[in-house]
Image (spheres, helix red, strand yellow):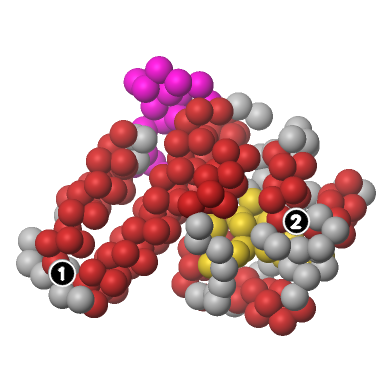
Amino acid sequence: MKVLVVDDDIVSRMVLMHLIDACGSFDILEAEDGEDAWQQMAAGLRPAICFCDLRMPRLSGMDLLQRVKGEAALAAMPFVMVTSATDGATIAQASELGVNGYLVKPFQGDEVHSFMAALAAPPASASESPQASMQRLGINAERLLVYLGGFEAQLAGAATDIAALLAAHDQHGARLRLERLHAGCLTLGLNGAAAAIDALAPGPLAPEPVRQLLADTVRAVLQQSAALRRENA
């Protein structure tokens, strides 16, 4: 399975490649910037997933994302934006273009593992079928992908916020954030993820189980997005 890592910073590139390698046996390829990556893909490279830095010379990560999603032969490839930016405008723009996930610097091994595990895993059987979700919501596949991307961005922000709330011993605030995520899961047909939130013990929330729960929810979103892309390829 080919994995493409795109970053003009060689240290960041090497660290991310090492973390991916620790997740299993992958054919890891690298590109020094967006233009290099685009030339490789134009020459026939078809990665199973692409991790791409946002800010690079010649061709930025956002510009590469736009080209990839506009190319029929590449559009279904999971594209993960690697960035230190957390501003809403960047996330909103990338979501509209069809980004499949975000990886924030400095890298965390468990987050990288979540993306690789989601790639290898079959579609979540506990989720509603994408077709059923579209019919229930009265939307098309493109709009459902936007919703899933937006929810993934919401999960990324919620993970940081909930961790801070738990560190501050604000159990009530953390529960409220989880309730909002539960509603999002139900709206998007992620029934297994919703059930997992429901199954949280009624007592004090512990940081590690909550962190794992949110990582599992991200995987459910990625699996649902991949299933939708396959159905509409």
The quarter of the rendered structure image containing the C terminus is top right
Quadrant in which residue 176 is drawn: bottom left
Residue 200 visible in this rendered orientation of the protein: no
Q: Position of residue 75 (x, y in %)?
A: 70, 38
Residue 17 pos. (x, y %):
68, 74
What numbered label is drawn on residue 170? 1
Give the residue displayed 55% in from the left and 77% down from the top.
106
Q: Examine the rendering and report whether any part of residue 182 can be seen.
A: yes
Q: Position of residue 93 (x, y in %)?
A: 58, 44
Can residue 126 be found in the magenta stretch?
yes
Identify the residue position indicated by label 2 in the image: 60
**Residue 105 as seen in the image, left or right of residue 152:** right
Instruction: Indicate whether 150 appears above or below 47.
Output: above
Q: Quadrant of residue 23 in the image? A: bottom right
Between 145 and 34, which is closer to the camera in this rendering? 34
The three-letter code of the residue at mark 1 reads Asp
Residue 51 appears left or right of 135: right
Q: Nearer the viewer, residue 105 or 125?
A: 105
Q: Which mark is residue 102?
A: none
Q: Amino acid at mark 2?
A: Ser
Q: Which image quarter holds the N terminus?
A: bottom right
Is there a contact, CB below 8 Å, between mark 1 and mark 2?
Answer: no
Query: Is residue 111 magenta-colored?
Result: no
Q: Is 196 above or below relative to 5?
A: above
Q: Which residues are magenta?
A: 124-141
Q: Position of residue 193 (x, y in %)?
A: 31, 48
